Amino acid sequence: MGGAKGVVCMKDLNDETFKTLSRVSTATLTTAMFKRGLRNIYLQGPQRLSPGKNMVGLAYTLRYIPAREDLDVLESFCDRENAQRKGIEECPPGAVFVIDSRGDATAASAGCILATRLQTRGCAGIVTDGGFRDTPEIAALDMPAYHSRPSAPTNLTKHHAVAVNDAIACGGVSIFPGDVIVGDNEGVVCIPAHMAVEVAEEALQMTIFEDFVLEMVQNGASIFGLYPPTDETTKNRFAEWRQRNNR
């Protein structure tokens, strides 16, 4: 669960909540979180390499600190305790691998081989506030991937992998192992695990209402009294619309 280091367990995210989060936008989720006083939950920087369905999963994290020349040499990859390699091999199926690269995209956070390994392990996605190398190949994977920009140099030139599945910062957002990570074609949000069920349900209801509003606006309606629904007739029309559209 979020807030403490521990093992990510996908059973902590129930099927109904997973399905709901797969249907709502990060924009709607940020509003639902804002209502609860959380303003800094949208990761600044990471963008999706190729469009697709929502990414939903529990955070499994990797933290980088600045590289040091006596430690970050090619031979370090031979060590099975190398935190980057260890994290890739231990990330659970269904989890989202989230990398704290300190917002530094001057060297790669990971490349296609590691991303492919995560995909074959059944992971839900990979996110970094740095950059990836081999981006054309990563973009072609079925697994969603988010980064700030392409970066060809090996991670060793700038990053030292220091901790797996610990609290990190990514895109300026605090992320704890087990937090719920949702990504769409716009970006990525982090939802504290204990809030996921209620936030998902409210976001779904907001989505249904906004679908109604969009249809009304497309048909020429003014937003006054409609969005937000301060006019009592709006609520009545919405109720009729929901019934008519089985929403």
Image (tube, grey):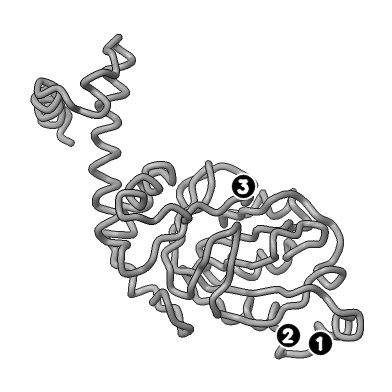
Q: Nearer the viewer, mark 3 or mark 1?
A: 3
3D distance between C-alphas at marks 2 and 1: 8 Å
Do the residues bearing badges 2 and 1 touch, measured as CB atoms within 8 Å? yes
Q: Nearer the viewer, mark 2 or mark 1?
A: 2
Judged from the image, the secondary structure of the residue bearing numbered disc 2 is: loop
Query: Which mark is on residue 78?
Result: 1
Left or right: 159 in relation to 116: right
Q: For mark 3, does the 10 Å Cα neighbourhood hold few (<14), some (14 to 19), or many (20 or more) residues?
A: many
Q: What x and y, as percent, mark residue 108?
A: 78, 62
Picture quarter with the N terminus: bottom left
Query: Which mark is on residue 47?
Result: 3
Q: What x and y, as percent, mark residue 61?
A: 57, 73
Provide the residue designation for mark 2: 82
Q: What x and y, as percent, mark residue 129?
A: 65, 58
Left or right: 150 in relation to 220: right
3D distance between C-alphas at marks 3 and 1: 31 Å
Type of amino acid at the residue the image marks with label 2 = Asn
Left or right: 122 in relation to 226: right
Front in this rendered view, residue 33 or 63: 33
